């Protein structure tokens, strides 16, 4: 069975996400399987997911997805490049994915492919270094450097968040045989806090939740996600953000020496010195971020660095995941799994205990994930209500296709 891949976080799953899955089937055929690679309990902007990965994955297979695989935490808490590379490696390893479908402000994959090729050009790093000397942020400098290699209208893709991620997908897809499919994004923009075209962004929903207006957001989510959020919140398994375990984070950071921070600053840009100084004395995470931030570094990068330090993640993700971890599937998804067990390039993991039969790399990665998830539990109102990673299997839905 041919399948389309979707890279996502579903934090939370809203109707724009449902629309993307429906468009994938409209464009590629009604029998196309939908395989999602989804961040686990931590998300790329540097934060806890608003509810746990199993609840979000279950909502996805009730909303159009057939199979949800986990993007392990080293890639989920990485830069856009690392996030895309890990997710694409996961989709490639299934042996089933023919197309990668993603939302796009421009709605056309061709200019994103041209940008991706230019970013790989031999002379691009030198152009980027020259632009960075101006002191602007990395995204702004990269866009200017790209203008020397592609048409200005193509380079403008790097000013749009979904297209920027699409460029990283296209970079990672090179040589894979998987075709990129850009679907025009409908409704509110990536960080917009208003509803447009009937859709509202995940960012807007999270903002309302942080304001204590969680109940009012339920109608903005996909119905299955609203039901999952209500259940998880009632059970005490819905983090309200970084603040729930702020003291635990700060305690970990105060143990770190400058060399520890330097390992998390592979660009050797000196950012680690700012983190080391602030980490010794900051009385809140916000104070630390305010102390460290400069015009050059996006806040999301700083937040990811804090979380990578807190969780003890490696300086950079490995080249590719060591297994394919199944979070949820429906009937069509189980058929995809049956095929993947014969053709996948990585072991398919449905039972946590089965990782003990795999090699040391897989065991190390799963152990890291399990430790990170135990710390995720501390961000929830009722930590004891969060199931242990070693005893959590996938959610299998067999009563229908969607």
Image (cartoon, grey):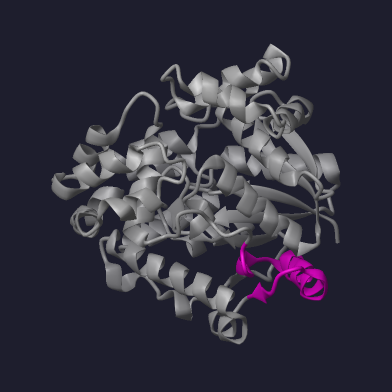
> Which residue is depicted at the point 68% across and 15% down?
148
Tell me if residue 125 comes above or below residue 239 in the rendering: above
Is 148 drawn above or below residue 9 in the view shown? above
**Left or right, 179 with reference to 170:** right
Identify the residue at image location x=44%, y=58%.
41
Quadrant in which the N terminus appears: bottom right
Q: Is residue 106 left or right of residue 60?
A: right
Residue at (44, 36) in percent of width and height:
203
294 to 2, vertically: above or below: above
Visible residue check, residue 271: yes
Q: Is residue 258 left or right of residue 358?
A: left
Q: What residue span does the magenta drawing correspond to?
A: 321-349
Image coordinates of residue 249 in percent, x first then y, are 25, 56
Image height check: is 37 above or below 290?
below
**Nearer to me, 98 or 364:** 364
Residue at horizontal 40%, vertical 26%?
Answer: 296
Classify the position of the C terminus by image quarter: bottom right
**Percent x, y of residue 222:** 54, 46
The answer to whether residue 227 is magenta is no
Depth order, front residue of 42/204: 42
| Tally of numbered discs | 0
Task: Give the image location of residue 20, x and y in percent.
Answer: 68, 40
Residue 269 location (% of width, % of height): 40, 36
């Amino acid at each position: 069975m041919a399948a389309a891949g979707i890279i996502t976080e579903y934090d939370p799953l809203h109707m724009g996400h449902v629309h993307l899955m429906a468009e994938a089937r409209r464009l590629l055929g009604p029998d196309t399987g939908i395989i999602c690679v989804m961040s686990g309990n931590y998300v790329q902007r540097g934060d806890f997911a608003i509810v746990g990965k199993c609840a979000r994955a279950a909502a996805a297979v009730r909303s159009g997805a057939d199979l949800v695989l986990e993007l392990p935490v080293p890639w989920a808490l990485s830069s856009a490049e690392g996030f895309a590379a890990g997710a694409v490696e996961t989709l490639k390893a299934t042996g089933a994915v023919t197309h990668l479908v993603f939302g796009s402000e421009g709605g056309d994959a061709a200019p994103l492919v041209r940008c991706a090729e230019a970013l790989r050009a031999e002379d691009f790093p030198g152009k980027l270094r020259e632009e960075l000397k101006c002191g602007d942020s990395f995204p702004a400098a990269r866009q200017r450097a790209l203008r020397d290699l592609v048409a200005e209208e193509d380079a403008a893709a790097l000013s749009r968040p979904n297209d920027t991620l699409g460029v990283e997908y296209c970079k990672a897809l090179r040589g894979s045989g998987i075709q990129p499919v850009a679907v025009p994004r409908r409704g509110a923009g990536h960080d917009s806090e208003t509803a447009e075209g009937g859709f509202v962004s995940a960012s807007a929903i999270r903002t309302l939740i942080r304001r204590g207006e969680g109940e009012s957001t339920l109608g903005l989510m996909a119905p299955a996600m609203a039901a999952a959020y209500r259940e998880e919140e009632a059970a005490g398994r819905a983090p309200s953000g970084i603040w729930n375990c702020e003291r635990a984070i700060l305690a970990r950071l105060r143990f770190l020496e400058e060399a520890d921070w330097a390992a998390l600053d592979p660009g050797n840009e000196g950012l680690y010195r700012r983190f080391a100084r602030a980490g010794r004395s900051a009385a809140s995470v916000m104070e630390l971020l305010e102390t460290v931030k400069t015009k050059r570094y996006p806040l999301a990068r700083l937040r990811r660095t804090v979380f990578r330090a807190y969780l003890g993640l490696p300086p950079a993700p490995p080249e590719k995941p060591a297994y394919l971890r199944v979070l949820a599937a429906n009937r069509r998804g189980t058929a995809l799994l049956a095929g993947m067990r014969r053709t996948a390039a990585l072991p398919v993991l449905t039972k946590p205990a089965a990782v003990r039969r795999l090699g040391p790399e897989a065991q190390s990665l799963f152990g890291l994930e399990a430790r990170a998830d135990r710390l995720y539990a501390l961000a929830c109102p009722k930590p004891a209500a969060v199931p242990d990673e070693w005893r959590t299997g996938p959610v299998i839905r067999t009563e229908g296709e969607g």
